[in-house]
Image (cartoon, rainbow, N blue to C red):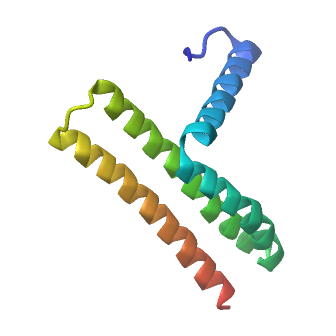
Amino acid sequence: MGKASGNGLRRIFNAWGWSLQGLRAAFHHEAAFRQEVMALVVLVPLGLWLGRTGIERALLVGSLLLVPIVELLNSAIEAVVDRVGPEHHELAGRAKDLGSAAVLLAIAVAMLTWFLILRG
């Protein structure tokens, strides 16, 4: 993986390729990400159908998309911590726990959003 180089369209094309590479890596290496993608396959169409207005649909779907976004950031943190070294360190454990807590909060936001919208 490299950094975005070049100008204009070339830089955008390179960044797009690296982003797709990251999504493929997450799907291949992260079980939680795969589970979240499978949930999206079911829940995104459901959210588009259940939402009565464009704003409701955006909130239902957007809250769902927040979960794998945070999962990707959590996975990136975990990969960097693991790269630094396999030995246990209090700060490494804290970084992983904080990333996991962020995923939990993203899931809570999605659940609360769905509950509030669907209860009418």
Q: Residue at x 48, y 71 (%)?
A: 108
Task: Provide residue 106's location: percent of width, then percent of height.
Answer: 49, 62
Task: Point out the image quarter for the N terminus.
Answer: top right
- Of 28 and 62, nearer the camera is 28
Say if residue 69 shows up in the picture. no
| Image vertical order of residue 105 relative to residue 118, above or below | above
**Residue found farthest to the bottom:** 120
Taking the image as shown, residue 74 lies to the left or right of residue 10, namely left
Task: Provide residue 92's location: percent of width, then percent of height.
Answer: 24, 39
- Of 89 and 106, nearer the camera is 89
| Image vertical order of residue 82 relative to residue 30, above or below | above
**Residue found farthest to the top:** 6
Taking the image as shown, residue 88 lies to the left or right of residue 32, namely left
Task: Provide residue 35's location: percent of width, then percent of height.
Answer: 61, 56
Q: Residue at x 32, y 46 (%)?
A: 96
Taking the image as shown, residue 21 lies to the left or right of residue 75, namely right
Q: Residue at x 16, y 43 (%)?
A: 90
Task: Point out the image quarter for the C terminus.
Answer: bottom right
Task: Provide residue 4's location: percent of width, then percent of height.
Answer: 60, 16
- Of 83 and 10, nearer the camera is 83
